[in-house]
Amino acid sequence: MSKKTLNVSIALLFHKNQVLVGWREVSLHQGDKAEFPGGKVELGETPEQACKREVQEEVGIFLDHVYLFDIITHEYEDLIVKLHIYQAYVDQSLLDHIESPWTWHDRSALTILNFPKANDAIVKRLLWPNKMAIKNIDRLDTTIDLNRVSYLRTENALDFALQLNQYNQLDQLIINRDVWIGLSESNQKKVFAVQFKHDQLMQLNSDSFMEEWKGIKRIASCHDHSSVSRAVALGFDAIFLSPVLCTTSHPQQAPLGWTQFELLSKDIHIPVYALGGMKPELLDQAIQHGAYGIAGIRAF
């Protein structure tokens, strides 16, 4: 006997670096567990329309814009659940309108909440470290720490992709789009995230990008207001914002400074990494200026 397919729309609502989470009633399917806002797609409505309706009914706020995050299918013993997942950013002005029992949680706290099994992939994608190493590398070697997330930069994308295709441990690696394209389809799904350079970001086709890249964790390199705005509008998962301080690797590039960094990052609801002149001991200072974390080449 074939299983019934249930189409569900889910909203990932972000404010600063927190995510809105509620609790499912015991009587519901997969009840007595944590949940994101959302519900069944009704006959005659699109998943996006269902998402906005559910948020208004459950949370008490109306969303003008939602962005496609992913589509995930999960098979239970009794039915198949197809999750249409959207993300949206909640403005400060709407916070007082959010109804109980919905509460804000830090991203790191999501791992200790008891979500339905179908949400495992969502939670995994929302998690980012607060410190990230960047390595300029053309050949894989034993200096790569496989126990922490690292962004590997290379000038030889094709050659490096060929090397990575022979490499089994990709789940801690961030690589540029050009390297990622050269990977096998199975390996593309293993990498921690795909990085887009500033120029690559600004050249993206906004009409097709979110559909083509749904389900892939993406981080954009930004240097100014236009690129930050572009990354947010395209639904990127995180941002490298640089250079914050003077660097020896790019001495000709004027630094943003902490004041400008804070101005650019203060209203961003996805993780923003301070990059450029960073040291591990600067993490607290970076967070005070609106960063989610820091990234660097030296001392990391």
Image (cartoon, rainbow, N blue to C red):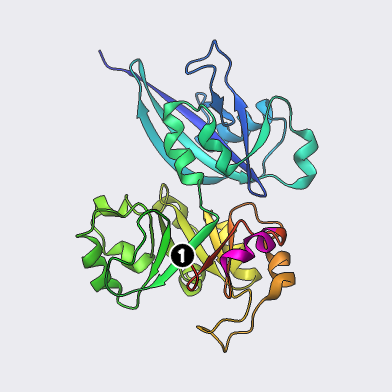
**Would residue 221 be visible to someone looking at this image?**
yes
Residue at x 48% of width, y 28% of height: 8
Residue at x 45% of width, y 42% of height: 124
Where is mark 1, residue-wise? 133
In magenta segment, residue 133:
no
Camera-side residue: 198 or 206?
198
* Residue 204 in the image: above or below residue 10: below
Camera-side residue: 206 or 227?
227
Q: Secondary structure at mark 1?
A: strand
**Would residue 205 be visible to someone looking at this image?**
no
| Magenta range | 279-287
Quadrant in the picture for residue 241: bottom right
* Residue 258 in the image: above or below residue 70: below
Quadrant in the picture for residue 7: top left
Q: Percent x, y for residue 220?
A: 51, 64
Q: Percent x, y for residue 84?
A: 47, 36
Amino acid on which disc 1 is placed: Ala
Q: Which quadrant, please, contains the N terminus? A: top left
Q: In the picture provided, is 188 more to the left or to the right than 82?
A: left
Q: Percent x, y for residue 113?
A: 54, 30
Q: In the picture provided, is 63 more to the left or to the right than 123?
A: right
